[in-house]
């Protein structure tokens, strides 16, 4: 795993430049993120962004996925920003409940969490991620949810965000935000 920390430069007012070192971890959900997925585009644009790779993207094993995330966070230089989509939001919550590296996390963006507790909303392949952890996350986080996501009802996404003490941002009707 290459060092994920790279300088991030942003232009500020009157030409000022703010430089900070951030490690971005891109965490796809079930099936990985395709070349056209927003996570893939962000990985290409964010300096030093690293994708958390999984052994089997189509048959996720919770313990395996947690171990891979733990290894990536352990390797990354703090502060780490987690950028998770779908099933990976549940992964982050499971990981956070047992990791000794949560202090390295500066923030988490949790986009379109999949309702792993609902057989109506999610496929059988994700059942090993149930129950969804509902403890407060030990770092700042924001949940983005679509109002017409087939994998979670907006009310459930809001409930989960509240349990995690995350910010919550409904982003309109964008399906599963792929």
Image (cartoon, rainbow, N blue to C red):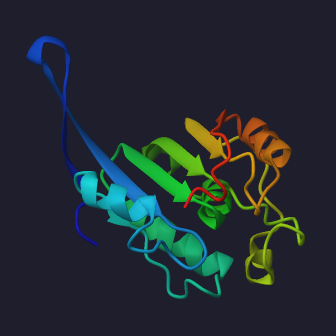
Q: Position of residue 41 (x, y in %)?
A: 34, 60
Quadrant where the N terminus is found in the figure = bottom left
Q: Residue furthest left?
A: 15
User: Toward which corner of the image does residue 60 lie, by quadrant?
Assistant: bottom right
Horizontal side, residue 61 vs residue 121: left or right: left
Residue 171 appears in the picture as rendered: yes
The one of 51 and 175 positioned closer to us in this rendering: 175
Q: Position of residue 12 (x, y in %)?
A: 20, 20
User: Toward which corner of the image does residue 128 lie, by quadrant?
Assistant: bottom right
Could you tell me which residue is drawn at 83 percent across and 64 percent down? 131
Horizontal side, residue 89 vs residue 129: left or right: left
The one of 146 and 156 positioned closer to us in this rendering: 146
Quadrant where the C terminus is found in the figure = bottom right
In the displayed structure, 30 sits above or below 148; it is below
In the displayed structure, 93 sits above or below 63; it is above
Q: Position of residue 100 (x, y in %)?
A: 53, 55
The one of 177 and 107 positioned closer to us in this rendering: 177
Q: Position of residue 145 (x, y in %)?
A: 67, 46
């Amino acid at each position: 795993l290459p060092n994920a920390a790279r300088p991030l430069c942003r232009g500020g007012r009157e030409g000022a430049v703010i430089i900070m070192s951030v490690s971005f971890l891109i965490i796809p959900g079930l099936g990985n993120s395709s070349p056209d997925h927003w996570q893939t585009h962000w990985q290409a644009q964010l300096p030093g962004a690293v994708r958390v790779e999984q052994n089997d993207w189509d048959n996720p094993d919770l313990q395996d996925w947690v171990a891979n995330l733990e290894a990536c966070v352990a390797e990354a230089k703090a502060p780490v920003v987690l950028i998770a989509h779908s099933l990976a939001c549940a992964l982050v919550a499971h990981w956070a409940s047992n990791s000794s590296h949560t202090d390295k996390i500066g923030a988490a963006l949790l986009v379109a969490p999949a309702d792993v507790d609902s057989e109506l909303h999610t496929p059988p392949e994700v059942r090993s991620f149930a129950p969804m952890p509902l403890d407060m996350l030990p770092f700042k986080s924001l949940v983005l949810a679509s109002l017409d996501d087939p994998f979670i009802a907006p009310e459930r996404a809001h409930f989960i965000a509240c349990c995690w003490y995350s910010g919550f941002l409904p982003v309109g009707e964008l399906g599963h935000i792929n």
